[in-house]
Amino acid sequence: MRLIVAAPLVAVIGFAGLALTESARQTSRASELGELARLGAEAGDLAHRLQRERVAAADLLSRGGPEQQDAFADATTATDAVTAGYRSRRAGVSAGPAGTREVLARIDATLDALPPLRAQVRTAAHASVSAMTFSYRIAIADLLTLRESVTLGVVNARIADGIRASAALSKTAEAVGQQQVAVLRAVATGELTPALQQDITAARTSFTESSLSFLALARPDWSVGWEQAGSGETALLLQRMQDEVSRTRSGSRLRLDVDAWISATQQWSGRLSDLRQRVDAAVLDDVRAAHAEQRRRAAAEATAVVLALILTALVTWAVARQITRRLRRLRDAANAVAFQRLPEVVARLQQPDGGTMDPDDLARRQSADALEPSSDDEIGELGQAFAAVHRAAVRTAAEQAVMRANTADIFIHLSRREQRLVDAVLAQVDKVERDETDPERLDQLYTLDNLATRMGRINASLLVLGGVGVGRVRQDDVALQRVLQAAQSQIEHYARIRLGMVDGDVAVAADAVDEVVHLLAELMDNATVYSPPGTEAWVTGRSLGDRVIVQISDEGVGLNPQRLHQLNDLLARPPAIDVAAVRAMGLVVVGQLAARLGVTVQLRPGPRLGTIAEASLPATMIRPLPPEEYVLSSARPSRRAARTSAPPPPYAPGDAPTEELVIYQQVNHWFRNGQANGHDGNGWASPADDAWRTAAQVAAPEATGTTTSGLPKRQPQRHLVPGAVTTPAPGQRSEYRDPTQVATAMAAYARGVAARRPTLTNLGNH
């Protein structure tokens, strides 16, 4: 309960603290802005005085008369008075943005350097006018930069525009001052040099830009003041003299009345200074008004915060005791559903038989009742809503399981029907191939056979996605090299596959041969499809004792690390059956087969380019081959590889090629066993000879006696063929058979019966 009471209070206090902190920060910022704005106004006055002192210094250095000495002394006195006011205002400003602090430090250093500069102006009879005036220009530039920096962080647009307008006026006055000095320097040197002409042009350009900036920001009354400052006889006189300066060519002597030039420019600069002071006064009034408004707002927010805290405490305490117990009951019930009941249902639906459940029935049986008995308030409605969500979640999970099962069944049935047609096509193609001797038509038949074989591989992939096996019933293990040849024969670009080092003393277990062939065929197909047509893909298979590593390397462009990680994750955790799984069927099928067989498949970059697909076959599916069955090289190339060579020559009657059938292998196996074990010196023997001898005794039955009526007696089970019926030993349990393997075997038998086609032992045929 205390937590329920404390949480709203803490939240309200936190938000109130943030609001009050922001309000206090804005109030402090308004106060700082007022100080900076007043300091900026003082900086404007100081810049104006330094501009006048600079003109007096330039005139003194140019003409050096007593009148110029007195004018310079008056200018320095006026500057010192304004400097004292600036320093007094500067002492009250200790904070501000980092950029403002740097500018203030530079201005302080420049003001400290004024006395030595003035001494040089007074004593140096032949001092450079440009060097002396440049020092004044630096000080004035820092003061103007300070005025512009005041606008940083100002959110009030009216105040910010006013400060910028005042700074623009200061820049306009500085442009006039620079033009003054440039003209005085031209008069002192006796000619208008190209550098001085360029300085005068730059000053007039700066004047124009600053004027436009001011007019864009100016309020109506400020614009009127600007028009008034630019009118009158003095302004016309200044304009005529500026035109005279503009008409003077570079290298010519500037014929201008210096006293008239100084007087006109000083009057124009004074009018601009008066207008700037009016703008600064208006801005300071706005800053003071904003500061007062911010203080009133902060006081109102503080009052509102206190009232909100009191009201929150009262309301929270009133409802906390009522809702605490109900919330605890709701929490316990929701935790039981979310962390126990629902995960159990979902886990059960993910089992192989999960798709056989009825979604609605399962949702009714597994759904929780209303978690909160009362439904007259929000807590009761929340409990009912959570129960409804639980039912919907269970129903959705069941529907997904049913949909996956139905989709898998569709894949299985479509694949098996298509496989019958594919087998029929292959049978017809084989029938035509036997009688065909034209090389071109035979090559076309081989291409058709390859297409049908690839269609069969796609059907097998659908079976894998459907969750059933693709293997056939085999009795013998198959050498690894023949497994690789079989996989090679099932892809389109089989001619680009090259077999490298393959250990010939290992074989793949009979029950895993077809699925391993399918897995490797998908990897080979990817290697040839996603690499340039003129390149080859190399396949190697080496035994490492506890596993066999098969590597398939191509020479394509390779994969970026992110895509490689995605594909390896897809192979390690293949997705459930969906549209995406069908679109990327190759690697999804590889992942499904790898998970079923316990094979590890991984993609990694090639040594130079391309990609290496590595499949690690576990020891459970690897069998050793006896020395006499080692496959050192491809004694008989795959059927597909054989078709790439020249067509076979015509055969003489009776010499038509035959293909090894299963019955031949079984009979040959009997003969090998007889040669090894059953030869008695007079003929061959086999385990079936005893059965034949027992069956032959039926023709001459022997009676062990007669009944009372004279009928012969027979010995029970005397004529049973040995090995036909086996009797389990006492206590012996029947062998366990995996249902999946049984289903796979039955499907293989069904395909064989439906196709009416002999099963060939040569893996390269399909």
Image (cartoon, rainbow, N blue to C red):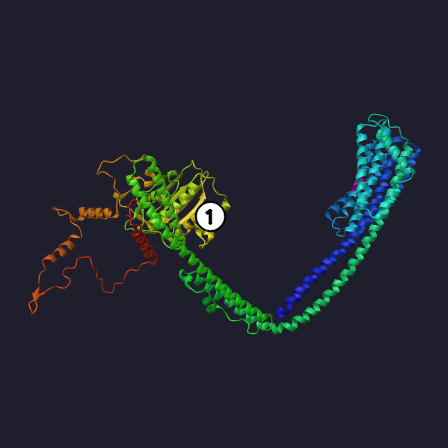
- Which amino acid lies under the numbered mark 1 shown in the image of this protein? Leu
Viewer-side residue, 463 vs 7: 463
At which x and y percent is residue 61? Answer: 87, 32
At which x and y percent is residue 198? Answer: 79, 31
Viewer-side residue, 564 vs 713: 713
- Residue 640 falls left or right of residue 144: left
| Mark 1 residue crowding within 10 angstroms, few (<14) / some (14–19) / many (20+) | many
Where's the N terminus, which quadrant? Answer: bottom right
- Say if residue 157 shows up in the picture: yes
Residue occupied by mark 1: 567
Majority secondary structure of magenta residues: helix
Q: Is residue 129 magenta?
A: no
Numbered range of the magenta stretch? 138-142
- Say if residue 488 shows up in the picture: no
Secondary structure category for the residue under label 1: helix
- Residue 617 falls left or right of residue 315: left
Viewer-side residue, 695 vs 249: 695
Above or below for 254 versus 26: above
At which x and y percent is residue 744? Answer: 33, 55
- Residue 442 falls left or right of residue 135: left
At which x and y percent is residue 317? Answer: 65, 72
Q: Quadrant of residue 272?
A: top right
Where's the C terminus, which quadrant? Answer: top left
How many discs appear?
Answer: 1
Above or below for 341 versus 596: below
Q: Quadrant of residue 144?
A: top right
Above or below for 541 versus 410: above
Q: Quadrant of residue 216?
A: top right
Q: Residue at x 54, y 67 (%)?
A: 386
